[in-house]
């Protein structure tokens, strides 16, 4: 005997699909922003600077040493402005930088 699962509401199915699409778009944007930052800061920055997240307009960046932490802290607003201009939308409202422990 074949048992069927309880039917789902179309709303929950569509919400699931939309959230998966948004998640994929966010990952793509994060990767593109990471590439842009590497080009802006110079290729040597790839060793020390990593975009670790993008959520609700906040770009999270991890750095490997205090020199990069200080440098990026001074550049925060310039980076926000240049990223938003580059991508032609207000993607980033704020940047949070943290020092990796390791």
Image (cartoon, grey):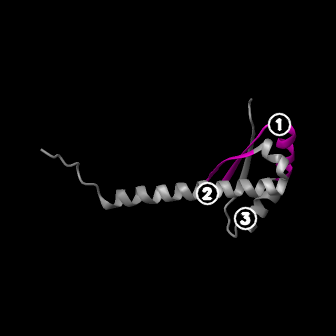
Q: Earlier in the sequence, mark 3 or mark 1?
A: 1
Q: Which residue is mark 1?
A: 65
The answer to which image quadrant residue 33 occupies is bottom right
Q: CA distance from mark 1 to mark 2?
A: 26 Å
Query: What distance separates the C-alpha of mark 3 from that of mark 2?
Result: 15 Å
Other residues around mark 1 within 10 Å, as few (<14) / some (14–19) / many (≥20): some
Does the stretch in magenta take in 58?
yes
The x and y percentages for residue 27 are 60, 53
**Mark number displayed over residue 28:** 2
User: Where does the image place residue 62, in percent across and percent down from the top left?
Assistant: 73, 42
As drawn, the residue found furthest toward the bottom would be 88
Give, as a single range, the part of the protein colored magenta. 50-75
Front: mark 3 or 1: 1
The picture quadrant where one finds residue 31 is bottom right
Closer to the camera: disc 1 or disc 2?
A: 2
Give the crowd class for mark 2: few <14, some 14-19, many >=20 residues within 10 Å: few
Quarter of the rendering occupied by the C terminus: top right
Q: Is residue 81 above or below residue 42?
A: below
Residue at image position (81%, 57%) is 39
The answer, for residue 39, to whether it is visible in the render is yes
Secondary structure of the residue carrying numbered label 1: loop
Which residue has dot 3 on it? 84
């Amino acid at each position: 005997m074949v048992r069927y699962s309880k039917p789902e509401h179309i709303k929950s199915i569509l919400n699931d699909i939309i959230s998966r699409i948004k998640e994929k778009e966010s990952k793509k944007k994060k990767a593109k922003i990471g590439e842009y930052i590497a080009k802006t800061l110079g290729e040597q920055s790839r060793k020390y600077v990593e975009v670790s997240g993008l959520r609700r307009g906040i770009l999270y960046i991890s750095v490997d040493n205090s020199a990069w932490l200080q440098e990026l802290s001074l550049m925060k607003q310039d980076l926000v402005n240049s990223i938003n201009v580059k991508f032609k939308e207000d993607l980033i409202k704020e940047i949070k930088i943290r020092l990796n422990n390791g």
